[in-house]
């Protein structure tokens, strides 16, 4: 039996690929049809862990131009981020845990502080605290603008990583 490996350095990967990576080993949590069969407590935990994995992954990128497809993969990761963030928002909203609700509130506050920067790259914040992405605007954004918001040295990602390090609790 042969195995096929994915050349992640030289391939353009989809947001679905990254969703699977961030939700691993609970990949069913990325699918809205399968989420319906899961307890909300599990979803809060899975979504928190996925956000934490995203934050770790996005900030360890080297952004040194070695990969010709790095902008496309970065945009796929950002699409995955929006999906995970929205999943977390939905599951936290249904949680009976005051701790989960408080952490979600802190995450939403941080995101709102970055509303202008997010809007500049095509991500807007809806009234229910979910995010909406404009693919056209995201596709037109310069890679350096994406890097400045999502790099390890950005204030937003430093705070985001700190918050997400506390999201993967079990309730």
Image: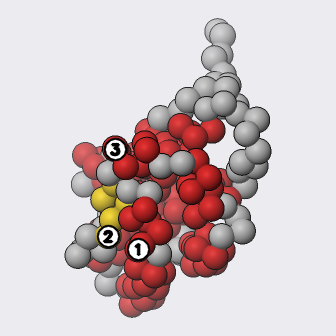
Taking the spot 53% from the left edge, 74% from the top edge, the residue there is 167
Q: Are marks 3 and 2 in contact (CB under 8 Å)?
A: no
Front of the two marks 2 and 1:
1
- Indicate which disc, 3 or 2, sits on the residue closer to the N terminus: 2
Q: Judging from the image, what secondary structure is the residue with disc 2 in?
A: strand
Give the vertical position of 108 relative to 73 (above or below): below
Rounded to the nearest angstrom, the CA distance separating label 1 from label 3 is 18 Å
**Total label count?**
3
Q: Are marks 2 and 1 in contact (CB under 8 Å)?
A: yes
Judging by the rendered image, the residue that carries numbered circle 3 is: 136
Rounded to the nearest angstrom, the CA distance separating label 2 from label 1 is 7 Å
Instruction: Classify the position of the N terminus by image quarter.
Output: top right
Q: Judging from the image, what secondary structure is the residue with disc 3 in?
A: helix
- The quadrant holding residue 9 is top right
Judging by the rendered image, the residue that carries numbered circle 1 is: 115
Instruction: Give 88 or 94, whichever is nearer the viewer.
Output: 88
Taking the spot 53% from the left edge, 37% from the top edge, the residue there is 72
Q: Residue 58, how many percent across, how many down?
A: 63, 55
- Whether residue 24 appears in this view of the structure is no
Judging by the rendered image, the residue that carries numbered circle 2 is: 125
Rounded to the nearest angstrom, the CA distance separating label 3 from label 2 is 17 Å
Q: Residue 113, how many percent across, how many down?
A: 45, 81
Taking the spot 73% from the left edge, 39% from the top edge, the residue there is 65
């Amino acid at each position: 039996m042969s195995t096929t490996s994915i050349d992640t350095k030289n391939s353009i990967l989809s947001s679905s690929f990254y969703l699977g990576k961030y939700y691993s080993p609970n990949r069913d949590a990325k699918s809205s049809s399968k989420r319906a069969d899961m307890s909300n407590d599990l979803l809060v935990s899975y979504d928190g862990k996925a956000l934490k994995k995203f934050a770790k992954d996005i900030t360890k990128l080297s952004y040194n131009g070695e990969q010709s497809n790095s902008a496309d993969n970065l945009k796929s990761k950002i699409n995955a981020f929006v999906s995970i963030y929205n999943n977390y928002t939905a599951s936290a909203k249904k949680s009976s845990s005051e701790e989960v609700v408080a952490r979600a509130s802190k995450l939403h506050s941080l995101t709102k502080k970055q509303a202008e920067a997010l809007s500049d790259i095509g991500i807007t914040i809806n009234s229910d605290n979910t995010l909406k992405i404009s693919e056209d605007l995201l596709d037109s954004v310069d890679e350096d603008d994406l890097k400045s918001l999502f790099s390890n040295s950005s204030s937003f990602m430093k705070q985001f990583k700190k918050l997400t390090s506390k999201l993967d609790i079990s309730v």
